[in-house]
Amino acid sequence: MTSDWPRVQLHVVTGKGGTGKSTVAAALALGLASHGKNVLLCEVEGRQGVARMFDVDPLPYAETRIATGLRHDDHPPGGVYALHIDPEAALLEYLRMYYKLGPAGRALDRFGVIEFATTIAPGVRDVLLTGKVFEAVQRNSRNRGARQYDAVVLDAPPTGRITAFLNVSESVAGLAKVGPIKHQADTMMTLFRSPRTAVHLVTLLEEMPVQETADAIAELKAARLPVGGVVVNQVRPRDLPDEALEAARTGTLDRTAVEQDLKRAGVEAGEEFVDTLLDEAREYAERRALEDEQREVVGGLGVPTYELERLAAGIDLGSLYELAECLKEQHLA
Amino acid sequence: MRTHPRVGPLAARAVGAPVLDVDALLDDPGTHIVVCCGSGGVGKTTTSAALALRAAERGRKAVVLTIDPARRLAQSMGIRQLDNTPRPVPLVDPAGSLDAMMLDMKRTFDEVVESQASPEKARQILQNPFYIALSSSFAGTQEYMAMEKLGQLYRDARRDGTYDLIVVDTPPSRSALDFLDAPERLSSFLDGRFIRLMLAPARGPARLMSAGFNLVTNALTRILGGQILRDMQTFVAALDTVFGGFRQRAQQTYALLQAAETAFLVVAAPEPDAMREAAYFVERLSGDRMPLQGLIVNRSTIATEESLSAAAAEAAAERLGGQAPVTAGLLRLHADRALLVERQEQLRARFAAAHPHVATAVVPALAGDVHDLDGLREIGTLLAGH
């Protein structure tokens, strides 16, 4: 089975808060890690969400194997590794790799320079986080012995911030017009703008997240960053046949028929329970109508879309593999 | 198989938790500030606006300070564009009044500088590239400026009697209550060795420069280049005086947040991540002795009077098979919903077990988005538990 994104090495997953972007990033990593491929899943928001989803100890600042990839078409899977990127550790590592500072490095820490750079200095935090992601995608001889990955998945900041986050050249431009930092940022930008990167957006079929997705796509395009696919998450199951939706919405379902069916199914239902069922059907049909409206908007965004069903029982490790399979079948992974 | 009436607590009530009385809070003339905090995507901004609207219609002179609202929110309040100046929300015959505004962090920062420094010095700061980047960058600055704006609004309201209730939305910070840390972080930064290091060359005497200082400035020059270092020095030197007043005000605002006239509401959605963050907020607020008033769980699925368990409904649907697709579908919908209800109740019960004193309001999910004042009003009604 072929992927829609065969050339992409860096999959950036963003989405409005509450849309489940971290879940999708995790499922995508599992899906990509089939067929013997090794995938690195990066987390940058200090939440340790990856550790929780995969039920492992909180991640250190070190690439850690956390799961076996999706077994697909009976090919042996690869491994999913995770990295929790912490800006302070990233800065120290960067200084170690690029500048032989010796005791001066420790002095920087002692004088609060590291803290200043990672918490107060504008834009620097983002550059450090994206810088580490860049390094993982484009490994060079400075990081000797480091593992090479077939793909890197970044669980990125939310849609409202994604363009600024990836547009590192822009964020250091105010500070550095020339010099080593500017040069670094430009090199990173070359990767982020290339076809080797894709920014996927996770949304729900609701107005606000869809609107934010549309806005983010426009912003990414304006910044010449490559837009990937839109993953529509938590789609309601299609329990009710399409032809019954209209009747459900207008409250004209055949009540007597429902009562008889329930009896046949061995449910001793009172009036109230039938009312409950019909109310629930009406609410569901209303939401389905809204979803269909939004699906049309998403369809008009001009990017490939993928759908994942809502799992009423919640997300556990097993369901991550189910979602991974869905993404694989739809060729996102 | 029988359906059964629900055993135990019903509908808009969290299992085991006391009920949050939103109206009592809004009506209390002693409540001057309501702070809504919570992680991103839980409906914090909409909740803030709905609370402010409800307060205004119940007679308060309210203003809502939003941080990063969707355009739709402004439109739903009948305002074309929200900005740094409070704009009146057109209400028909309200008992009180409602203004709305959106934090413009760069503008707020500029105003602080302009009010603290001489015109010449202010110009110098405002043009410094380091300042421009700092004042418009996203992380951190927003929290400082939200605090600053709240303090300003509060002082103006006290002086001119413009408002008697300020409802504040908070930035969707990842690290929970960044805005609480703002004064502390600012102080430790200003008192820190880094600032002294930056100021040392400007203040001249070389004897101040220890070997360590030299080491660090040399390293910085190598990494950053001389130009950035000089810009930073000018910036820090120029801002040093300005920040003094800013820090003092940030500390005042912090004290104001701890006062009895303030009420914190933690907003969450019935999802494991959002509830976990809510628990973190609650703990952090208690740790900082902030007056926490309650938890709001938005977008909840509410149990119905008469129900069948998820498993029983699923089994019944199975028995009907393909013969009665509509009724089988209805049963599956019911099963799906029963699962959601169960899971959400469990999440709230777990939260209540760990934080039994936190009053909770459970707000049912609406089918559509909010488009107008009626929509906001409906949310307000649901918040109040009606």
Image (tube, rainbow, N blue to C red):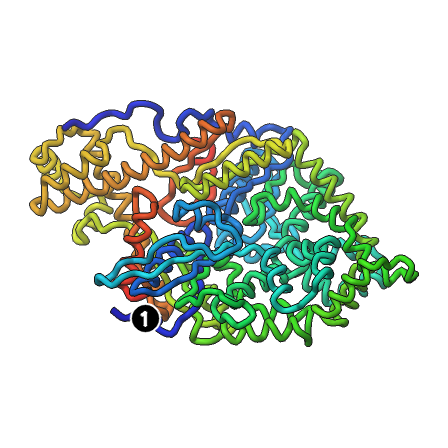
Q: Which residue is drawn at 36% across and 53% down?
A: A67
In this view, the residue in front, A136 or B115, is A136
* Drawn side of residue A287 relative to residue A62, left or right: left
Image quarter (top left, top right, bottom left or bottom right) of the C terminus of chain B: top left
Vertically, is B381 above or below B206?
above
Q: Is mark 1 on a helix, strand or loop?
A: loop
Foreground of the two, B377 or A157:
A157
Q: Which residue is rendered at x = 15% and y = 43% of the image?
A: B328
- Quadrant showing the N terminus of chain B: top left
Report the chain holding disc 1: A
Q: Is B71 placed above or below A227 here?
A: above
Q: Is residue A1 left or right of residue B131?
A: left
Q: Mark 1 — residue?
A: A4
Whole-percent x, y for residue A10 in the image: 44, 67
Q: Residue at x 37, y 48 (%)?
A: B368
- Graded by Cα atoms within 10 Å as few (under 14), some (14 to 19) or many (20 or more), the crowding at tag 1 reads some
The residue nearer to you, when weighing B102 against A219, is A219
Give the residue at x 61% y 64%. Answer: A94
Residue A114 is at least partly visible in this image:
yes
Rendering quarter of residue B203: bottom right
- Relative placement, left or right, of A56 versus A183 is left
Against B76, residue B284 (above or below) is: above
Image coordinates for residue A69, horizontal then vertical, percent: 33, 58
Q: Position of residue A71 (x, y in %)?
A: 26, 58
Residue A164 % position (x, y): 56, 64
Residue type highlighted by circle 1 = Asp
